[in-house]
Each structure stands twice: as C-alpha cells, then as structure tokens.
Image (tube, rainbow, N blue to C red):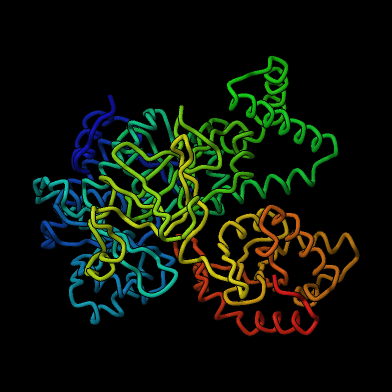
Amino acid sequence: MAHKFETLIEVFQQSTQKFASRELFGEKKNGVWTWVTYGRFAQLVDDLRGGLAQLGVRAGDAVAVISNNRSEWAIGAYASYTLGASYVAMYEAQQPKEWQYILNDCGAKVCFVANDKIGATINGFKAECPKVQYVIRFDGGENEPDTFASLLRRGAETPAPIIHPKPQDLASLIYTSGTTGNPKGVMLSHGNLAGNVSAMHECFPMRPDDRSLSFLPWAHSFGQTVELHGLYSMGASMGIAESTEKIVDNMAEIRPTLLFAVPRIFNRIYDGLQKRMASESPIKRALFERGMAVAKARKKLEAEGRHSALLDLQHAFFDRVVFSKVRARFGGRLQYAFSGGAAMTREVAEFIDNLGIMVYEGYGLTETSPIATANYPGNRKIGSVGKPIPGTRVEIDTSVTGDPKQGEIIVHGHNVMLGYFNLPEENAKVFTGDGGFRTGDMGYMDEDGYVWITGRIKEQYKLENGKYVVPGPIEQQLVLSPFITNAMVHGMNKPFNVAIIVVDQEALKKWATERGFDTSSMPELLKRPEVQKLYQEQVAEYAKDVKGYERPQRLLLITEDFTTQNDMLTPSLKVKRRNVLARYNDAVEELYKQALAEGVKAA
C-alpha cells in the first residue's frame, strides 16, 4: 500500500533514514558530475536550519529564494520547512520589479540569491523592502560575509531543533506569473504538497534506481512538487541540467530513466528529430517513417486489446535498428516521460511514445499543488490528461460555457490551495461554496472518467460574427511546423483571425538558399511572396483540423522570439498575450486594413 505523508517534514525524515547512502543531487562542475547523497543533504539541511535560526527565522516567517535549480535551493527549502517557515521561490529570469513586489508582499526576512549580480540588485532596492533583513549569496566562500557557506558554518556550530508543522500550515508560497497584472501568491500547505506526493506513490511507484535530469524550474509547482519532493520521497536521484541548451548533452552523460517536462520541450524534441530526419539519406528516412508506422499500428491494436505477432516482430526490428539509436542520444535508459503545465498535442505525444518512451500526461495548476489528474500505468489515454488522482474529485460546470458537452473544470480535494495570499477578493472569485477550485480551464470528462482539456476560458474570445475561438490549441498545432518557432493567434471582435508567427530563421534560410533567394536581410526575405506563400501553406497544413473560421487568414511574420527577457513570456513560458499585442498592434491592424481593402470576407 502506498505511503501517506502528512507533511514535508515526514518526507524529509523518512527519506533521510531509508536512503542515506544513495545519490540525490548531481551537478556538473569543471566538467565533472559530482553527487550529494541523501545523508549529506540531510546534514546540510540541519546546518542551514541552525544558520537561519541564528538570523532570527521562526515558525510562520517567510524565506525567499531567487535562483535556478541547484542543490543549495533544495537545502534552503528543507531548512525553512524544518523551522516551520515557508519558502518563497522566484526565477532568475523574472523582472526585478517582480522580485521587489513579491518580497514586499510575502514579507520575507531572508532572501537567498544565486549570485553577486542578483544580490546587488536586491540590495539596490532593499530600502523599499523593509522586511528583508538578510540577502544571502549561494556563491562565495565560508569566510566571506552573507554567503551560504558562512551560514552553514554558523549553523553547524549552533544547531536548531526540527519544528513539526501541522498539515494545514503554510509550506510554499508560489507566485503565479500571471499574463496580466501583478503575480498572485498561491499558498500551499504541507498537507497540499505531501498529499500530492502521496498520490504519486499510489499512481507512479518509482524506484530508488530511477534518475531524472532536472531542468523544470523548482520555482514552478510542477518541478517543485513532482520532481523535487516526489523523487526525493522515493529515493531517486536528480542530475541538475547545466542549462536548457545542454539538456540533450547532459541526458547522454547522466543517463536518466525519467523525464519531466512541459510540452514546449517535447515540441523541441519532436521538431529536432523531424529536422534531423529531413537531412538524412532517403534510406534512413524511409526506415524511420516505416518504423513509426509500425509502432503506430501496434499501439492501435494494443488499445483495442489485440496484438499481431507480425507487427511485434517488425516493431522489435525497428526498435533495435532505429529507435534505440534515437534513445541513445538521451542516454539510452529513458523509459518514461511526464508532461504537464499545458496541454500536449496528440501528434507529439504519440511521436514520443512510438520512440519507446512511455508518455504520461497530467493536468493541474499551481493552485492544485499542482497535480489534479494524470495518466498512469494501467490508466492511460493519449490525448487526455488522465483521471483524477487519489483524494481528488473533478466536476465540469457547463453553466459557464453554455455548452452541454464541455465546461469549466472544478477541482476538489486535499491538493486545493489554502488561497491567494492577502487577496480575499480573488479567493471569493475562484472558490465554490463547497471548497472547489475554479480552474478557468475548459474541458470535459469522457465515459471512462478521463479528462480532456479544450482551452482556457480567459483566452477564449468572440470573432465579429459571434463565434467563439480558443487560440491555445491552434497555436500548439502551428508550432509543430519546422518553419515556426512560436505563434500567437488573435481575432477578438475582428472579422477573422490573424497569427503573429515567429519564424524559424535557420529552417527558413535553408529553404530560401535552396531556391536561390538572397538571405542577407531577414526582413527583406520575409517580404518575398514566395515566403508568404510558404507560411500560408504551413498554416493550412498544421491547422487543417481546426474549424474554418478559426484558421488565421493573415500572417504577421516576425524574427524576434517571445522570451522572458523581452517580457513576452512568463517564467513558466506562457505567452503574455497583452504584451505581444501591444508590441505588434499597429502591424496587426494594418493586416486587417489590407485584407478588408482586398475584399477578404469575414470568417
């Protein structure tokens, strides 16, 4: 029977006792991977707890952190939990104004920072954050002031006892990187997080021999709960990626068995392999395509409860000759991939699955700790986001959409947050009378109990003709094109949709060079009618399954990607639609004027 955890302190103490000698965190330094064991991690947590206590951190206080994933991040988290304090995580990629807002809102007494640069920024506006008393740098030696190492030394000399919080006590304050307005602090209790971890034990009984490459930010609820706390509770290990650019290289080095990622990462894998196959010899391309067809046919039979000895034989051949070589690029041991954070396109999920990497898609939000539903062994439908996890109930409120087939997803259970920090008006908007959380997502539940996501209510808009459009699924299809890096569909109160498309410059230049076009100026290249026609064809191909009135009729081709640096993406990689539209509004309006002048009819 799966273990039931009540608090993260139980997770910490039991994992320390059971897995003391096993490897926990791996980090690559000076070209070499070095690993910290569970036992060593526990000792560092104890030392830091003493150090934080010396700084005056007490139960009910907040400790903040601004850093990418690293072992110090996790040590800081568990040192805070074991003092009864909450941990408030922020991203290095966030705007300084957001750091300042969050530090003031949560009232953190101590703020850990990754490096001197971030530390200097925080100290620069410290006067506007009166509650922040200490800024502690992860980098630096133990003889330097205000460093992690010096705080560890102080704590080792003055130990502090473990505080045992109650399940309802605050453990983590995660600020949702809203696409509009200030971020909201989601209060997650020990019971919320430990309950999600307990459900993982019941649905995904992982082994101590399992290993992941950690690149999902722990500042995000998916990475924090599912990977950090979940794997820690099972005795597994995590190698911390050097950067997103080094993911494939790092996977080959540490040979993970598990992959936790958002759909954007799986889209990159899909796109990368498609481009690689396009450049291979005709024989290799034919082998790959035939192998994919066999894998797909075999999966279809399996779903129907049947099998074919001939297909099994063919699949074994293609797996050995083709797919095993693809998996070898990821270390050769990768068996399972877990996707969350946004809906994954069925095409990509089936593609990864056919490579011999079992894909399990789940659904949830920061406000649900985050897992609300999941596919798991014995209960899996590709394309769905699975069934409600143990201890969770999902209902569909069709009154919101007026559509009897789909409605707003409402989540009930141990995973539902305590509420938004200092925002009673917002809490009143999202909680039902019986404690359910209104997710703002649209979907339906099929006859077998699987949940399917159809869009985001706040993103839904009406065209001029009164027809509703949900842009997210359209955009997810468009970015599967090898010529498209990113896309945003717009058409609120307009006669038809347009798409702002970030072109894949490498793919486009290759295509243009093959046709003898001048590629010295990308803006000039984008104006060529042949390029415009190429992208119209790409949209027609990749959006062929959407309704006619949903398909973009005009395209704005741009070269600057949506990033956190230009404030077009949130730290969790969601498009900030308002910001993108503000940047390109004049160009978009010009598209509509031209189209209407040309007599283009409304959708």
Farthest top residue in view: 309
Relative vertical location of residue 496 with respect to residue 261 in this rendering, above or below: below
Q: Position of residue 306 (x, y in %)?
A: 62, 19
Q: Position of residue 452 (x, y in %)?
A: 49, 46
* Front-most of residues 261 and 419: 419
- Which of the 4 quarters of the picture holds residue 86? bottom left
Instruction: Tally the numbered discs.
Output: 0
Image quarter where the N terminus lies is top left
Image quarter where the C terminus lies is bottom right
Residue displayed at 67% across by 67% down = 501
- Which of the 4 quarters of the picture holds residue 16? top left
**12 relative position to 467: left or right:** left
Farthest right residue in view: 516
**438 relative position to 453: left or right:** left
Q: Position of residue 151 (x, y in %)?
A: 20, 57
* Front-most of residues 310 and 174: 310
Q: Can residue 142 be seen by looking at this rendering?
A: no
Q: Position of residue 136 (x, y in %)?
A: 26, 64
Residue displayed at 75% across by 79% down = 595
* Front-most of residues 114 and 488: 488
Relative vertical location of residue 312 with respect to residue 97 in this rendering, above or below: above
* Front-most of residues 346 and 352: 346
Relative vertical location of residue 398 with respect to residue 569 in this rendering, above or below: above
Q: Can residue 21 be seen by looking at this rendering?
A: yes
**54 relative position to 513: left or right:** left
